Image: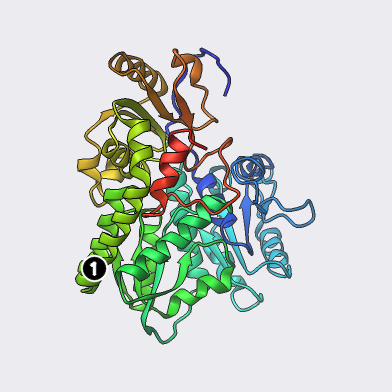
Amino acid sequence: MSGSSRRGRLPSHWPFSLGAYLAVNAVSDALVVVDGPDCVVLKGEAIHGNHDWRSTLLGTPLHPRLVCTGANAETVIFDRTDALLQLLAAAATRPDVGVVLVLGTPISQLTGVQYDLLTRRLAGTTNVPVAEIADPSLDLDWLDGYDEALRALVRAVVRPCAREPGTAAVVGPMVDRMEGDALGNVAEVRRLAEGATDLRVVATWPDGGGAADLARAAAADVVISLPYGRRAARDLATATGATLVEAPLPVGLGATRAFVGTLADALDTRPRADDFAARETDEAVRAVLPFGLRRFRDAFGAWLGDPLLAPGVTEWLADLGCRVDVVGATVRRVRHRVDAEPRGASAWAMRWAPDLDAFCDAVVDSRRHAARFFGVVPDAIDLPGRLAPAPAVLSELGFPSIDAHAVATRPYYGFRGLATLVERLGGLR
């Protein structure tokens, strides 16, 4: 971040396509064909080599997993059906590709291209499935794009099969990169689900694996839904007949215990879940509390970023004595989205900033009452010059994280993630 004092509006949302790219990035052999101008590839650079240093999304010039048609205002007026079919079929023949997705853009959709018809024409003619990522509306944001890409994967890879009793699929963690924090979150969610129930998790959507790994979800007897894949989870459960359990995002102590309790109530494993939660809580809190209280007690904090992470993280910081009452988000319809989540409304009794100016002004006002300040703000947004005097710690969590990276396994979900939250947000590493 620079120290610019430039005033400007907070982006109301990261675009739909960026969320779709994050989902494709998290499936190792997925390829997306974007029907739009060359500049659509530039959005992939926000992920590849910036947010995610292990990304293969852009691959090499000969083997990218993000491909564009080059369509522009001059070419979209012509019938491009045959060219699109040839490009999709060629993508499906690559030996490193296990599933092909196609995504329209507003400029191409104005001409009425029916991508679902193209994918149906290709059905049975390619070695790998091809599916459309639907609804790239300008009214939707990156979180919608992520969920819709997961829905496309359900249509592409899930095939009817016998369900296996005692198994589960987890749909909808935010796997925004192939680094140790996001992959650690996947492992932690699986551990929580298996610790709280007698289920065995056979698939996580996504988990950094390939299309064949995702396909195992078809046999799951239970689908555990997390906020980033609500619609995809419903689609999967409808397609397979599995039991659907919608659980809160397990971030922070309160939300993690709520996740465990939700599974216990839905699957009738309350005694086991209570024992598991009690052991994990005692172990995690004893290890973290001395550091957390010393770092955050009587401090002030502000959050700018992913709204689905904010409630659990800010509640955990409040448990440690840090007051977080200024919040901004990189999506539209924030209250509609978050209040629909379990525990969402009560967790958001805080000051809401509709734009960047209001966010900065609220931080400056609130800082008059606190000697220390902790901010969770993406490096991609220029703020420090507005927040003088300098904050004690300015950190990143979730997407985008340009400066913060995870080489080792460092989950911030679940009980094991409590220490990571204290370390990263408190500047202890």
Residue 159 image point, x, y percent: 48, 79
Which amino acid type is shown beneath numbered disc 1?
Ala
Q: Choose between 21 and 372: the one closer to the eye.
A: 372
Residue 87 image point, x, y percent: 71, 61
Can see residue 140? no
Residue 197: quadrant of the picture? bottom left
Residue 308: quadrant of the picture? top left
Q: Is residue 277 left or right of residue 422?
A: left
**Residue at 53% from the left image edge and 46% from the top image edge:** 17
**Residue at 26% from the left image edge and 39% from the top image edge:** 319
Q: Choose between 381 and 140: the one closer to the eye.
A: 381
For residue 282, above or below residue 165: above
For residue 128, above or below residue 402: below
Q: Is residue 79 left or right of residue 255?
A: right
**Residue at 50% from the left image edge and 42% from the top image edge:** 399
Can see residue 53? yes
For residue 175, above or below residue 264: above
Residue 221 image point, x, y percent: 35, 79
For residue 223, above or below residue 55: below
Q: Residue furthest right?
A: 62
Q: Choose between 220 and 367: the one closer to the eye.
A: 367
Q: Secondary structure at mark 1?
A: helix
Q: Say which quadrant the N terminus sits in.
A: top right
Question: Mark 1 sits on what residue?
Answer: 264
Residue 22 image point, x, y percent: 54, 51
The 10 Å Cα crowd at callout 1, few under 14, some 14 to 19, many 20 or more, is: many
